[in-house]
Image (cartoon, rainbow, N blue to C red):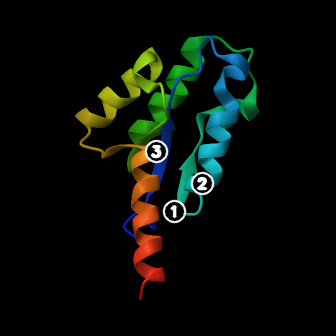
């Protein structure tokens, strides 16, 4: 699998959603841990503390995208998130691959099917 030695960063909507959408981030993280060497889940930043100011979260996410991530994985609704749009813009400027979670799931399903058909 092409992702096994890579670190991915999960980007998606948080602001204004129940529980800041943390359940979706954690579900994606659990799936992606089977595929990537390391998964950066911004819902785990600051031990999941939801009381800090928005710029603090954005700075940490930008730092992680810039210095730690090999690629970005997008959750559903990412286009409605100013933070995710910023992270994607930075990733694209840095020439990091950006892929939707649903597309990774399709690749995994294809690989599973090709192995089981052998």
Q: Which residue is mark 2?
A: 31
In primary-sequence order, the first of circles 1 and 3 is: 1
Say whether marks 3 and 2 touch (CB < 8 Å). yes
Q: CA distance from mark 1 to mark 2?
A: 7 Å
Q: Which residue is mark 1?
A: 35
In the image, what residue occupies the spot 46% across and 20% down? 83
Q: Nearer the viewer, residue 99 or 46?
A: 99
Q: CA distance from mark 3 to mark 2?
A: 10 Å
Per the image, label 1 sits on a secondary structure element best described as loop
Q: Is residue 3 left or right of residue 60?
A: left
Note whether 70 is above or below 75 in the view shown.
below
Q: Is residue 117 visible?
A: yes
Note whether 58 is above or below 69 in the view shown.
above
Q: Return the x and y of residue 56 as percentages of the image width and height.
A: 59, 18
Per the image, label 3 sits on a secondary structure element best described as helix
Work out which quarter of the rendered image holds the N terminus and state it: bottom left
Q: Which residue is mark 3?
A: 101
Q: CA distance from mark 1 to mark 3?
A: 12 Å
Q: Is residue 55 left or right of residue 88?
A: right
Q: Residues within 10 Å of mark 1 (few under 14, many from 20)?
A: many
Q: Residue furthest front?
A: 117
Q: Residues within 10 Å of mark 3 (few under 14, many from 20)?
A: some
Q: Return the x and y of residue 67 as percentages of the image width and height.
A: 42, 42
In the image, what residue occupies the spot 51% across and 30% down? 61
Q: Nearer the viewer, residue 101 or 29?
A: 101
Q: Is residue 25 left or right of residue 12?
A: right
Q: Nearer the viewer, residue 18 or 90?
A: 18
Write down the quadrant of residue 48 in the picture.
Answer: top right
């Amino acid at each position: 699998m092409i992702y096994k030695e890579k670190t991915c960063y999960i980007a998606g909507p948080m602001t204004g959603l129940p529980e800041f959408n943390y359940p979706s981030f954690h579900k994606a993280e659990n799936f992606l841990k089977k595929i990537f060497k390391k998964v950066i889940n911004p819902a785990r930043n600051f031990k999941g503390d939801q009381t800090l100011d928005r710029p603090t979260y954005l700075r940490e996410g930008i730092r992680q995208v810039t210095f730690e991530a090999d690629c970005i994985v997008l959750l559903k609704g990412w286009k409605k998130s100013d933070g995710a749009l910023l992270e994607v813009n930075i990733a694209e400027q840095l020439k990091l691959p950006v892929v939707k979670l649903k597309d990774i799931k399709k690749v995994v399903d294809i690989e599973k099917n090709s192995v089981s058909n052998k």
